[in-house]
Amino acid sequence: MKQLAPGVWQLSGFPPNGINVFVLEDVLVDAASRHATRRIMRQISDRTITAHALTHAHPDHQGASHAVCERLGIPFWVGADDADAAENQALIGERQPDSFMAQFFHRVFTGPGHPVDRKLAEGDEVAGFAVLEVPGHSAGHVAYWREADRTLVAGDVFFNVNPLTGRPGLRPPPDGFNDDTEGNRESMRRLAALDPEVVVFGHGPPLRDRGALQRFVAEREG
């Protein structure tokens, strides 16, 4: 596990930075695919984890959620508009776009549903971070923002890697995985306007370049 900011750690995975899982203080954020359970449990075995939160209920973020919550006996926190999908994995498949890759990842990565104990909404607090509702990639996608040191957990509103080549670099999530691509563009604008100092992503390495999100959005809209 690698510390990225005060109270923020990234779990290791393969390939590195491919599908990211984080710990914010004592909260596990995201849970990769259903094949990641052993990897996650091994890395958090010496830590006190009191809750598990998602950025969004997609196959590569909720896959091990049920197993982790069951084994640790911890509550499950999900954005309000993704909560039903997090509880019923069939809804994840129904809400994935009808593209080959989206449906393939659903079949291969999605884990069992798990009861949601807390439906996250705008302005809620998780491990010292404010919850921001940033829909588009999924209906209930949330990000986590700590203004004190300008640290942002962006989920999949942005990718910081090319999913085909593995080459690092900012890009929007592929349209074929979005619930609402135009909605995600608006969420990109919102997160860029925060002007974060450190950004961590669901896919790709962390970014330490204040102004990078703003420049990226401005270039795309220019």
Image (cartoon, grey):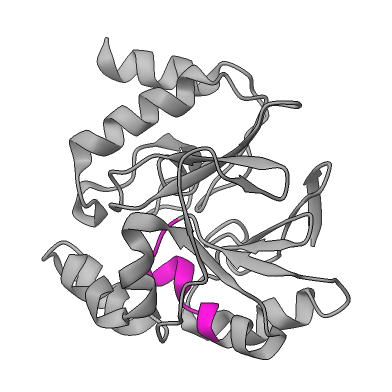
Is 1 on the left or on the right of 160, as rendered? Answer: right
- State the residue at coordinates (29%, 38%): 184
- Residue 49, how many percent across, how many down? 76, 70
Of 97 and 92, nearer the camera is: 92
Quadrant hosting residue 147: top right
The C terminus appears in which quarter of the rendering? top left
Using the image, determine if residue 125 lies above or below residue 85.
above
Residue most extreme to the top: 222
- Residue 24, how many percent across, how many down? 72, 53
Q: Which residues are magenta?
A: 56-66
Residue most extreme to the right: 46
Asked if the stretch drawn in magenta spans residue 1, the answer is no
Of 10 and 121, nearer the camera is: 121
- Residue 110, how many percent across, how many down? 37, 79
Answer whether residue 130 is visible to the viewer in this image.
Answer: yes
Is 167 on the left or on the right of 171, as rendered? Answer: right
Is 25 on the left or on the right of 111, as rendered? Answer: right
- State the residue at coordinates (51%, 53%): 202
